[in-house]
Image (cartoon, coloured by chain):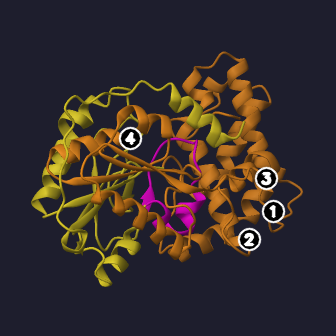
Amino acid sequence: MCALAHVFEKAGIATVTLASTLSVAERMQPPRALWADFPLGRPLGHPRDVEFQHDVLRRAFALLDADVGPVLVHHPETIESDETPLSCSIPPAFDADASPAAQEIRGLRKAYERSVEARNGVTEVGRAISPDEIEHAVAVLQSIVDGTPWSEAGIPGGNTISLIHDIRSYFEEAAMQLVDGPPPAGRAAEAWFFEETETGKVVMAARQAIKDADGPFPVWFYMAPGHR
Amino acid sequence: MSGDVAMRALGDNFPVPTFDDPAWVTPKPLSQATVAIVTSAAIHTTDDERFAPGDTSFRYVPRAARNLVLGHWSPNFDRTGFAIDLNVVFPIDRLEELAADGTIGSVAPRHVAFAGNQPDDVATIIHDTGPAAAAELKADGVDVVILTPV
């Protein structure tokens, strides 16, 4: 982000950067930057809070009044991520022959479809697999947990980063349709997926199994956020 | 340690490029300026090509587009904020409101998205695709860009 600020300024366009990592902004010194201690992934602070977003923009555009730079100003508010798992009940889809993860995936399907409809067809799912392939993909991950070598398991979608992205997005997008009240805090849905759902537990167990089998670092590490 | 704290601590040790003799533009008054968003969130429209890992190219985001996908490859940030309200990453509706009330001159016809997950030196973006995108926005009459990360 800071590099692009220098590039665009050099091209004759005045730039204002919303900086998400203070130490990077301090070292790269973009012409004008507003550092905000907000959750990563939410540089304008709060979703659906028009007034707050305008306040961020107002503070950012005010930096254009500076005569000399670089200018680095701190936003006065901190918004912390909350890694308390989201409180989200998955609609039941009981099938004695289905795994707990498969029952979750089926139970969330209608909520996922409502999310896609609410976003006019937009979904993050589809980078590697379709929604219809998620149940099979999680079964493959379970087979790795159960002892199938990861390189022989037939992991769908070409790579684990994309695959887990799609599975996690399916769950998180569905969950946004199942919770009431104000938008959940940053990382609450992540914590719910990895800590509370059976599918998330399968993902983490498969990640551990690939790691224990000396699988390549990129294959297992990016299956979950780095601090997990 | 929370995920955001861990990621920012990682950022403390990222090697970063340095810029000798950095440029400085004195902009026209904001109320007369055409403003564009440039984001490193790898945003693209649903019918556009997805970003590949380490992709150094960019996508145009038309002013009216709202069918936007967050194509960044990192698993290390929250995506639900964008799913709830894309303006929390890409404040296009806020810019429209600022143009309507006269705070800014106008909203640019095209905006630009890069992928922030890049090789350490970001050389291609600095020397090739970044200047190319900037030239396009300059040709569109853009005076000011606001840069947003994830």
Q: Which chain is yellow?
A: B
Label 3 belongs to which residue? A84
Label 1 belongs to which residue? A87
- State the separation of the CA atoms marked 4 and 3: 32 Å
Closer mark to the observer between disc 3 and disc 2: 3
Q: Are marks 1 and 3 in contact (CB under 8 Å)?
A: no
Q: Which of disc 2 and disc 3 is earlier in sequence?
A: 3
Closer mark to the observer between disc 2 and disc 4: 2
Residue B10 horizontal side relative to residue A210, left or right? left
Between residue B49 and residue A158, name the one nearer to us.
Answer: B49
- State the separation of the CA atoms marked 3 and 2: 14 Å
Q: Position of residue A169 (x, y in %)?
A: 60, 55
Q: Chain of mark 2?
A: A
Closer mark to the observer between disc 1 and disc 4: 1
Q: Are marks 2 and 1 in contact (CB under 8 Å)?
A: yes
- Visual hue assigned to chain A: orange
Query: Outermost residue, right direction?
Result: A96
Q: Chain of mark 1?
A: A
SS assignment at label 2: loop
Q: Chain of mark 4?
A: B
Residue under the point 51% across and 24% down: B13
Check if mark 1 and mark 4 are on a common chain. no
Residue under the point 48% across and 42% down: B73
Q: Position of residue A195 (x, y in %)?
A: 80, 46
Check if mark 2 and mark 1 are on a common chain. yes
Closer mark to the observer between disc 1 and disc 3: 3
Label 2 belongs to which residue? A179
Magenta segment, which residues?
Answer: B68-89
Q: Is A155 colored magenta in this rendering?
A: no
Quarter assignment of residue B145: bottom left
- State the separation of the CA atoms marked 2 and 1: 8 Å
Label 4 belongs to which residue? B52
